[in-house]
Image (cartoon, helix red, strand yellow):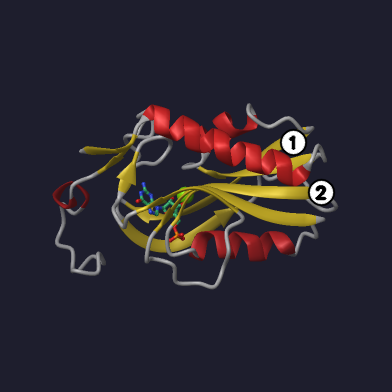
Amino acid sequence: MKILLSEEELRAGVEKMSSQIDQAYAGKPLTIIGVLTGSVVLLADTIRLLSMPLRVGVVQAASYDGACRGELRINSDLMPDISGHDVLLIDDIFDTGHTLKKLVDQMKSLSPTSLRTAVLMRKSGRQEVEFDVDFIAFDIPDEFVVGYGLDFNDEYRNLPYLATLAPEDVAPRDLGSDGIQQ
Ligand code: 5GP
Ligand code: MG
């Protein structure tokens, strides 16, 4: 395991992104929705840096089995009413982009006043959908990362730093060069 972003680097990046969010909304009330489970640490840190009146909610999206991508499942049972509210959807990482795009499409149908997105990280060269994230703290290389909320098989979420896992750690089974399980 190799450290990609230290605790200090993460703090500085999250502070910078939070102040951009603060400025963008200029004191207007905001509903911030964290995508479970990977965004919990970012959500907790970000909300304490924002100064507007804030409602906090969650939505669940899951697409991973270990490091292998499966079908995206969305559970919005826990999401507060967003109709007529300014909403910021916050997630851990923008990889192919399918998760955020699908969530945003679904949430738009609930008539929020506005809907923007923020992520801790965007992985280079992986985007598969046309979608622009509004706030990004870090651009990172194409590696599988854990820590600061991100897991591998539900472990490592509690690491205070962000680390990359070696390919042999994330691919214990027989994986093809495209990362899809054979
Ligand atoms: P996307 O739909 O953009 O391809 O994937 C987004 C989701 O996949 C993220 O919310 C995250 O849960 C998961 N994901 C993508 N890349 C990584 C990674 O490097 N590490 C971990 N732990 N999860 C990832
Ligand atoms: Mg996620």
Q: Amino acid at mark 2?
A: His
Q: Which residue appears at 64% of the width and 43% of the height?
A: 20
Q: Write the residue at 38% across / 65% down.
A: 126
Of 3 and 98, the residue lying toward us: 3
Amino acid carrying label 1: it is Arg
Of 40 and 23, nearer the camera is 23
Give the x, y percent position of residue 23: 72, 41
Task: Look at the numbered disc 1 and give the secondary structure of its residue.
Answer: strand
* 151 w.r.t. 115: above or below: above
Q: Which mark is residue 55?
A: 1
Mark seen at residue 85: 2
Quarter-of-image position of residue 105: bottom right
Q: Residue 132 placed where, x, y %?
A: 58, 64
Find numbered disc 2 in the image and state the secondary structure of the residue it sits on: loop
Q: Is residue 97 above or below residue 93?
A: below
Q: How far separated are the C-alphas under marks 1 and 2?
A: 10 Å
Query: Circles 1 and 2: CB distance less than 8 Å?
Result: yes
> Where in the figure is residue 27, as x and y percent of width and height?
81, 37
